[in-house]
Amino acid sequence: MIRGAASGIPVEAAVVYRYSSENESGAILMTESPVWRESLYYDQPFREWVARNSTTLLKARPEIREHGLWVVRWIYSTARCSLNAWTAKEKQITIGFKAKAVGAGELGPDADWYESSADSGWIHSQAEEGDRKVVFLGGLHFLFKRFSRSGQHLKDTSMAPKWTFRGANDQNIGIIVDLDSDESYEITYTEVGKLEIPAGDISDNDF
């Protein structure tokens, strides 16, 4: 904790924190309370729908052959947020808060915040009245791995990028055939940003 006047924070701030990272990249996301969670808990209906409609999807939207298909299952949203992200070593960000108390497991007080006038790189987003801004999302990322036929062998010719998600494992759905080009596609999916709801937490926003 540091003094606000020496860090470019208005004197109205009750407490000031300085966040830093020694890695080559980092980010700080500030959100206004409350933060809303809305989700569709089960992923099986989406997997089945993609498997049933994969041929139609590949014909209607050929770009998914290269980029894959995203299905968003849950979001967190708020009315106002600020983001500062960087790709430099040893950057520091200073933030002041009106509140004095810090809750257990939190990185800062649950209150309005002030940003240091000396820090650059902040991006601010304010939702219109009655609307909210999405700050986190997760779901399923489907990849269509293409194979070209050569006699009895299948040669992988996929150009789709391979995203790496922490703690995620690829799951196989099966092989479908694009009849127009006589090519086969292996469909795999990755659960991105796994949604974990605390035991006993029953919310009207979870369907």
Image: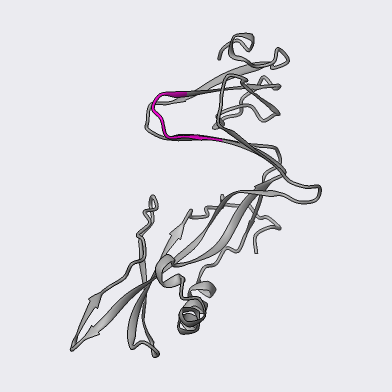
Direction from residue 132 to residue 89 in the image, left or right: left
61 vs 18: above or below: below
Picture quarter with the N terminus: top right
Q: Where is residue 167 in the image (x, y as percent from the top left)?
A: 38, 52
Where residue 118 sits, quadrant-wise, is top right
Where residue 161 sits, quadrant-wise, is bottom left
Picture quarter with the C terminus: bottom right
Does 90 lie within the magenta span?
A: yes
Taking depth in this image into account, of 60 and 77 the one nearest to the observer is 60
191 vs 103: above or below: below
Which residue does the image show at 47% across and 82% down from the upper left?
59
Which residue does the image show at 18% across and 88% down from the upper left?
152
Q: What stretch is highlighted in magenta?
A: 84-91
Direction from residue 128 to residue 119 in the image, left or right: left
Check the image and tell me how it is coloured.
one colour
Q: Where is residue 169 in the image (x, y as percent from the top left)?
A: 35, 60
Taking depth in this image into account, of 156 and 18 the one nearest to the observer is 156
Which residue does the image show at 63% across and 12% down from the upper left?
4
Does 161 lie within the magenta span?
A: no
